[in-house]
Image: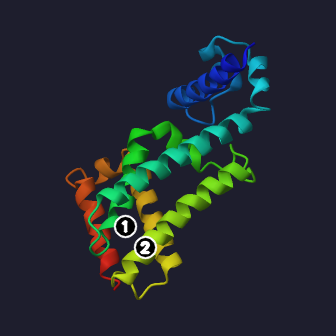
Amino acid sequence: MSRASTLDLRARLLRAAEAEIAATGPARASLRAIARRCGVSHQATAHHFADRAGLFTALAVEASDLLLAETREAIASAPVEGGQQVAAAGAAYVAFAQRHAALFDLMYRPDLLRHDDERLLVARRTHRDLMVDTIAAAQKRGWGVEVPTAELATLGWATVHGLAVLQRDSVLSAVYPDVDLDSVLRQVAHALDSLT
């Protein structure tokens, strides 16, 4: 098998894993089903991934990189005033969860990933550093100055992650059908802004 074919199979396995997770959920997605989607034997996956956790971890790294890119783009597009860039980052997180539900479902599953994988650790730290830097920059402009930067980042992440999960699971719209998610995100930013 040529190097190009080998790399192509790796990419195909990642896309097949994403599709299988979307169809069955991450806990039920098997290597056999993923291989079947690619038209290869499940033994062929061993050329790229030792096991399902290895494949899922690679997919989680890819998802983390995509989330990072989308978050950077949202921050760069937002006005610099106040906490607007922080709010844009939060909105990007929720939007990512909606657009890439299968990837989002996988990214924070300790039972399915190798959490000591260096690539995954680096991807998570890079996203954390982006958020901390964005919040620190807003604090230099007078936003959120009464709360330590890391605590504000943690509070913001917990809030938007909760919103993303509630929205993904259709709980938010079922319990609060008249609430607009974009409005809620603006209110979260306003609430965080009131901490100044």
Percent x, y for residue 91? 34, 56
Percent x, y for residue 22? 50, 31
Quarter in which the C terminus is drawn: bottom left
Say above or below: 167 vs 40: below
Q: Is residue 93 visible?
A: no
Calculate the distance from the C-alpha at mark 1 to the C-alpha at mark 2: 6 Å
Looking at marks 1 and 2 on the same chain, the residue that comes earlier in the sequence is marked by 1
The quadrant in which residue 63 appears is: top right
- Give yes or no for contact between labels 1 and 2 (Cβ–Cβ under 8 Å): yes
Q: Amino acid at mark 2?
A: Ile
Q: Which residue is mark 2?
A: 135
Question: Image point 29% across, 68% down: which residue?
Answer: 84
Which is nearer the eye, 112 or 136?
A: 136
> The residue tagged with tag 1: helix, strand or loop?
helix
Q: Amino acid at mark 1?
A: Val
Q: Which residue is mark 1?
A: 86
